[in-house]
Amino acid sequence: MFRAEHGRAVAVLTRIFGDLEIAEDAVQDAFAAAVEKWPETGVPPSPAGWIITTAKNRAIDRLRREDKREDRQAQAALLHAQGEPEEVGAVYDEQLRLLFTCCHPALALNVRVALTLRMLGGLTTTEIARAFLVPEPTMAQRLVRAKTKIRAAGIPYRVPYEADLPERVRGVLAVVYLIFNEGYAASSGDTLVRDDLALEAIRLGRVLVDLMPDEPEAVGLLALMLLQHSRREARVDADGSLIRLKDQDRARWDSDLITEGQDLVRRCLRRNRPGPYQLQAAINAVHSDPPPTDWTQILQLYNHLLTLDPTPVVALHRAVALAEVEGPAAALTVVDALNLDTYYLFHAIRADLLTRLNRRTEARAAYQTARHLTDNAAEQRFLEARAAAT
Amino acid sequence: MTQYLLSIYQPDGPIPEPEVLEKIMRELNAVNDEMRASGVWVFGAGLHPPETSTVVKASGGDVLVTDGPYTEGKEHLGGFTVIEAEDLDAALHWARKVAKVLDPLAIEVRPSQS
């Protein structure tokens, strides 16, 4: 209840008062009041409506007190609230506006992620700080600065101009996928899967699909996250070491998530407006099919993805499929031409191809290089084991 | 409405050839005219090179006048425009137009307090 309602309430209050910080404080007050009152009075018939009304009344009380001290910000917010219609409709539109504000390109990427988790995800500053391994005061300061910039620079609460929309939608999807990846394969720290972040990203992904029903990439992103998340239980062994896809115990894959993800892939591909998230989801959908894996189809999907997103990282992943279809020698030629020297996965994949070509000394060196380039403990253990076995 | 300062940062050193510069100035004037027609333009100017500037600074009771520029560095303010816009998205819409004309110069968009 809390996380889902938090985003809605902050979105409505932001519309009413025209200020993110006032909205956030008011919603926090209202949730605190709910914790205090509901055990006595029982949960009201419309908890969301109760939260919003309580938050609004508390904010107005507080602003009136500050108004007496001639606080300019309070005056502006009160004036804004008087000009706004009373009804609490189109909450979805308001959440979408808030999402575009939190993911505005004028904010630094790590700030967009933190703000989205705070405002729409309802995570506390403490939780966000812990998730990103940043001291709490640092994260608190980051959020305060972001809110100050939004107010001072006039970052608007609205759906972007038509001309900016495709780029801004991509920006929002990227923030949600970044949150998922931080949860799925934490870039540092001791657990490979941080379920809470991944689950929050999936929840936000569902909100995005609701908010942007005509955007197949939003559906593609949700499908991609569901399919990746379906393998979370099978991705690490008892010692916390990474298990490769082909070595995973398929019985431990979550079949409900796979079914949902594969259905979504079919649904969005039918629209025939493929994009990078849809194609990555389709690749994951093929991987989720019963064995043997259809590598030819995966390679075709990667070929398509590479035309839409011609980056070395995509080319690297494509090379893995190429190795299955045309053999490790062809794949190694492709990989060696990529400029990804600082990316651990580049060296890990090179090492695997070299192993299959029986070039063991080079393979061992490549595993060791990969090992030094990742901070994730599960990946480190996996790479150490591979280097030792080569 | 907020007033935004659009600062154009320019690397020190030689300026483009006259024929290149003329085309840029023509396009820039066209964007400025568009700003005026839309009612967002407040004020703007291109500046002489930083070597022409003079710094005035008080220290204790004395006011010292020295040869400029004040900030060290390889880039300096080359010109600016003040616009009045509804919000940052509207200001960025105009900044993008200026940036396209002045490619590859960076435009810094900064809100004013008033």
Image: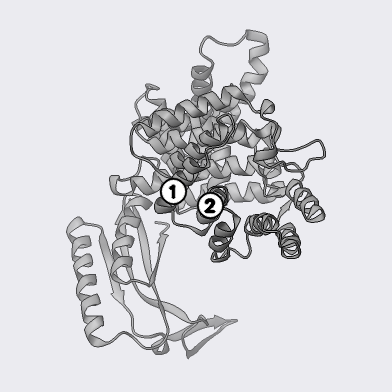
Q: Is residue A12 left or right of residue B38?
A: right
Q: Position of residue A226 (x, y in %)?
A: 55, 31
Residue for point 63% across, 59% down: A343
Q: Quadrant of residue A279?
A: top left
Q: Is residue B48 above or below residue A140?
A: below
The answer to whether residue B43 shows anywhere in this view is yes
Q: Name the mark nearer the viewer: 2 or 1.
A: 2
Residues under labels 2 and 1: Cα distance? 19 Å
Whether residue A67 is visible here, answered yes or no, is no
* Residue A164 pos. (x, y %): 33, 49
Which residue bears the numbered disc 1? A305
Q: Amino acid at mark 2?
A: Glu
| Lower sequence index among marks 2 and 1 | 1
Color theme of the render: one colour
Instruction: Identify which residue, A269 or A388, lies in the foreground.
Output: A388
Tell me the residue at 45%/44% (across/down).
A301
Name the foreground residue: A345 vs A66: A345
Q: Using residue A220 as the reference point, say whether residue A199 is left or right of it.
A: right
Question: Which residue: 44% across, 45% down?
Answer: A300
**Quadrant showing the C terminus of chain A:** bottom right
x then y, percent, for residue A76: 41, 41
Mark 2 sits on what residue? A326
> Which of the 4 image quarters holds residue A331?
bottom right
Q: Could you tell me how many numbered marks the image carries?
A: 2
Amino acid residing under circle 1: Leu
Q: Kindly identify the residue that appears in the image at 25 percent across and 76 percent down.
A: B24
Where does the image place residue A58, in percent across and percent down from the top left? 54, 27
- Is B26 left, or right, of B111 in this rendering? left
